[in-house]
Image (spheres, grey):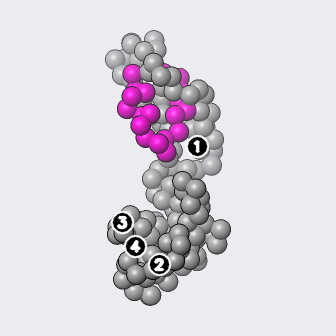
């Protein structure tokens, strides 16, 4: 524990940013100094999180971006024709739309959540991600390879 934490009996464990450009840069400078050490008391809590970046700042301070911006960024990545790569599988808009159709989503609903006109719409971002994480585990009628 650093000297200031010892004096105040408080410890800062995470710094957050709302993704404003200057704040984001400061967040990176303060929290991406080192990889979290295996001897850290929080290592056993964070290391199982496979998508967690284990960079930390002084005294193992971790960064936290405003989730709304993270959701919007993910949705915007999913809107790109190229899609995103997840565990060696390309997830493209056409594949996602096929899964939605197979799960019984209405064509109007699919068209609305894939509307590229408002990339800042948190509700659209959350709605698309919710539709993805509520898809059935087993594909239905589509038998194409990779579906």
Which element is circle 3 on?
loop
Which element is circle 1 on?
helix
The residue at which mark 3 appears reads as 137
Mark 2 to mark 4 CA distance (whole Å): 8 Å
Q: Which of disc 1 and disc 3 is earlier in sequence?
A: 1
Label 3 crowding class (10 Å Cα cut-off): few <14, some 14-19, many 20+?
few
Which element is circle 2 on?
loop
* Residue 7 place in picture, x, y as percent: 39, 12
Splitting the image into 4 quarters, where does residue 80 fall?
A: bottom right
The residue at which mark 4 appears reads as 139
Mark 1 to mark 4 CA distance (whole Å): 42 Å
Q: Nearer the viewer, residue 103 or 143?
A: 143
Q: Residue at x 47, y 78 (%)?
A: 143
Mark 3 to mark 1 CA distance (whole Å): 39 Å
- Asked if the residue at tag 2 contacts the one at tag 3, i.e. Cβ–Cβ closer than 8 Å, the answer is no
Query: Is 54 in the magenta?
Result: yes
- Inspect this view and state whether residue 12 appears: no
**Quadrant where the N terminus is found in the figure:** top left
Q: Which residues are magenta?
A: 41-59
Which element is circle 4 on?
loop
- Asked if the residue at tag 4 contacts the one at tag 1, i.e. Cβ–Cβ closer than 8 Å, the answer is no
Query: Is 34 in the magenta?
Result: no
Q: Which of disc 2 and disc 3 is earlier in sequence?
A: 3
Report the mark closest to the observer, 2 or 4: 2
Mark 3 to mark 2 CA distance (whole Å): 14 Å
């Amino acid at each position: 524990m650093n000297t200031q934490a010892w004096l105040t009996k408080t410890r800062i464990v995470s710094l957050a940013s709302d993704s404003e450009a200057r704040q984001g840069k400061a967040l990176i400078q303060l929290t991406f100094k080192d990889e979290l050490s295996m001897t850290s008391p929080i290592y056993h809590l964070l290391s199982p999180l496979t998508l967690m970046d284990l960079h930390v700042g002084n005294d193992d301070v971790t960064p936290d971006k405003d989730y709304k911006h993270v959701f919007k960024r993910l949705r915007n990545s999913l809107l790109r024709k190229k899609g995103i790569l997840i565990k060696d599988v390309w997830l493209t808009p056409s594949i996602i739309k096929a899964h939605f159709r197979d799960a019984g989503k209405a064509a109007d609903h699919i068209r609305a959540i894939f509307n590229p006109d408002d990339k800042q719409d948190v509700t659209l971002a959350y709605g698309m991600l919710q539709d993805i994480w509520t898809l059935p585990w087993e594909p239905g009628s589509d038998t194409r390879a990779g579906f």
